[in-house]
Image: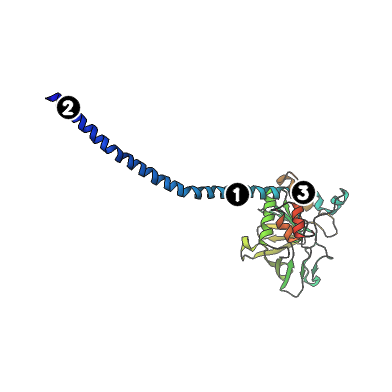
Amino acid sequence: DLKTRLVAMTRTAGMLYSDEEPLVRKDRDGAGSALGGCLGCLGPCCQCYCCFCCSMFVFLLWVVLMAWTTQCGLTSFPVEHVLPENAIQAGAVPLFRMGTSANMNVDPALGIDLTGTWWMDGNPFTIEQLVSFAGGAGQGPFPAHVKMPTNLAGQWTWSDSIFGRLVMGWYNFISTVDETHDFMFVNSSYAEIDPVDETTFGDNIFPFEKISDDEWLREVYVLRRIIYEDGTPHPVQWPRFLDWYHATWPSGQMVVYTTNNQCIRRCEYLLPCFICKRICGPM
């Protein structure tokens, strides 16, 4: 009868479900095992990648900390102390080394006077401001090759900011202390400059054109003499420079290299000063 048939169909369906259930479980277990195998394979890779990223982050933080705090191969000082008289009156040793006839060996017959301290007025890279050509050397006749060792201690300034200090570190690792700015003077009023930083500027040559006794055009900015070789300030450009610097960098501090020890200059961005001195030797 109908009731008997319904009971038989229900039992048959139950048996089919019971027979198929292990197969379903098997399929699910197989998929889970496959996924687990993939994750098991990726797990070590993900862990290594995470460890690498964390290590790099910690390393970069360490470099930033070293750059911001080091006073080993570089030193910060008030911008007013660029003028030797101000530094001496404050009981400090002048850290900026300006060019003089005594420490430059440029043939007088060339008629090129780059003594004193020079401001890169209008330089879009405002973390760099002053340069000295102390140690410059070149002989006539024209065309005359004049080498300017601007990488030496106390001959280039940067703002005392984390960016300025990191750029100093960048230069330390792409150039050496004894590299020079090479000027090829065609005559006493025009030269072409081969920059120190060839990594950034490549083989570009920069024109250098005389405007007046105290001004030279360096393509994108004007190089202005703010201090004469006898230590007296330029009556116009020195006050202008101070006003500009305080407006641009309110801290009023700038930084120079205070050592020509290449090892110290590089090491101080990675290790504390006392360790660098043991590794690199005298300042």
Residue position for label 3: 242
Q: Earlier in the sequence, mark 2 or mark 3?
A: 2
What secondary structure is marked by label 2?
A: helix
**Camera sees residue 126:** no
What secondary structure is marked by label 1?
A: helix
- Quadrant placement of the C terminus: bottom right
Q: Earlier in the sequence, mark 1 or mark 3?
A: 1
Residue position for label 1: 55
* Identity of the residue drawn at 65% across and 47% down: 61
Amino acid type, label 3: Leu
Residue position for label 2: 6
Answer left or right for 108 relative to 35: right
**Alpha-carbon span between mark 1 and mark 2:** 70 Å
- Tag in front: 1 or 2: 2
Expressed as whole percent of the image width and height from the top left, the position of residue 114 reads 77, 63
Expressed as whole percent of the image width and height from the top left, the position of residue 193 reads 68, 66
What secondary structure is marked by label 3?
A: helix
**Camera sees residue 50:** yes
Answer left or right for 26 relative to 164: left
**Image disc number at residue 143:** none
Relative to residue 123, is residue 20 depicted above or below?
Answer: above
Amino acid type, label 1: Ser
Q: Residues within 10 Å of mark 1 (few under 14, many from 20)?
A: few
